[in-house]
């Protein structure tokens, strides 16, 4: 896992400076180095950094593949894997990028998120993205990635980004919905959601005067006792 410095850990160029730094964790499941998956992850990170002040941590799953496999069979994470899991659950927002394997996310990507506490991503803004050889695999965003994070009760930003091999060949034109435009739009959406909902508020479920609903729930046994009284 690496902590980004320089252009991806910065304050946006506008004169209005946010009062806090937004913590973004980037999970990249690319298997080669370099990889188009990591390239897309970096482009998305830059888009978020252009919109708000961010502190970036990057989790490269290929470096944790053996640790992930050992944890699945032993139940004990290595120090490096524990650090990566903590980076994900402790972030204000998440960028998750995977290559497409067999019309879905990669096994390494799914195995990692199988190890994340099922409640840890509740309410967390997540930007999902994928890479593949052709555009015909782009529906993986909607039939695999978005449902996965919906199951984890994360808030998936409206714009998901898929990059096919041909998408990297041209800059595109403004308004044509090309890769660069989708990256910018998705980055703006994640920045707005993550900067507006600090991780501390997300963990407690209380923000802007929200009530602690769990504390107000009346146990079922008490309802039965009242009915029988």
Image: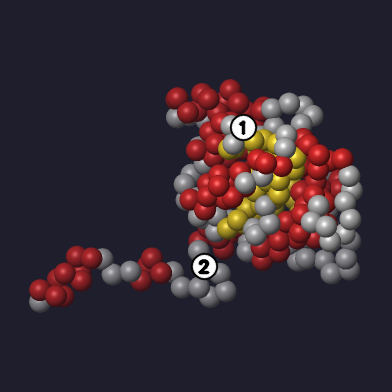
x%, y% of residue 181?
81, 56
Position of 173 with respect to 214 (left or right) is right
Instruction: Specify the quadrant that holds the C terminus.
Output: bottom left
Residue 37 visible in the current orientation: no
* Front-lying residue, 227 or 76: 227
Residue 7: % across, % down: 86, 48
Residue 183 seen by the camera: yes
Label 2, residues with CA under 10 Å away: few <14, some 14-19, many ≥20: few
Quadrant where the image shows the N terminus: top right
Relative to the observer, which residue lies in front, 111 or 195?
111
Left or right: residue 82 compared with residue 2: left
Depth check: give the residue in front, 18 or 119. Answer: 119
Q: Residue at x 61, y 32 (%)?
A: 101
**What is the count of numbered marks?**
2
Mark closer to the observer (2, 1): 1
Looking at the image, the residue that sits furthest to the left is 229
Task: Report the residue marked by disc 2.
Answer: 206
Which residue is painted at 69% across and 32% down in the image?
A: 30
- The residue positioned 60% from the left and 56% from the top of the image is 156
Residue 16: name its quadrant: bottom right
Height in image: 63 above or below 39?
above
User: Residue at 46% across / 73% down in the picture?
Assistant: 211
Crowd around label 1: few <14 · some 14–19 · many ≥20 (10 Å): few
Left or right: 184 with respect to 92? right
Q: Mark 2 and mark 1: span between their CA atoms?
A: 39 Å
Mark 2 and mark 1 lie on one chain; the one further toward the N terminus is 1
Quarter occupied by residue 98 = top right
* Percent coordinates x, y for residue 41 in the rendering: 74, 43
* Residue for badge 1: 101
Q: Position of residue 23 (x, y in %)?
A: 69, 53
Q: Secondary structure at mark 2?
A: loop
The colour scheme used here is secondary structure
């Amino acid at each position: 896992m690496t902590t980004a410095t320089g252009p991806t850990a910065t304050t946006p160029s506008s004169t209005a400076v946010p009062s806090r730094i937004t913590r973004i964790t980037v999970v990249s499941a690319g298997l080669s180095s370099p990889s188009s998956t990591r390239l897309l992850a970096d482009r998305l990170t830059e888009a978020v950094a252009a919109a708000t002040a961010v502190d970036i941590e990057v989790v490269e799953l290929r470096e944790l593949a053996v640790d992930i496999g050992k944890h699945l069979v032993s139940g004990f994470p290595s120090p490096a894997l524990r650090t990566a899991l903590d980076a994900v659950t402790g972030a204000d927002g998440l960028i998750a990028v995977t290559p497409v394997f067999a019309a879905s996310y990669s096994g390494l990507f799914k195995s990692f998120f199988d190890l994340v506490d099922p409640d840890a991503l509740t309410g967390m803004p997540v930007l999902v993205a994928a890479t593949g050889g052709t555009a015909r695999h782009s529906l993986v965003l909607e039939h695999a990635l978005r449902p996965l994070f919906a199951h984890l009760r994360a808030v998936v930003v409206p714009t998901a980004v898929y990059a096919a091999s041909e998408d990297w060949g041209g800059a595109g034109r403004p308004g044509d919905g090309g890769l660069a435009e989708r990256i910018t739009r998705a980055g703006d959406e994640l920045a707005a959601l993550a900067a507006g909902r600090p991780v501390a508020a997300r963990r407690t479920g209380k923000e802007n005067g929200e009530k602690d609903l769990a504390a107000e729930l009346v146990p079922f046994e008490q309802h039965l006792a009242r009915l029988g009284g």
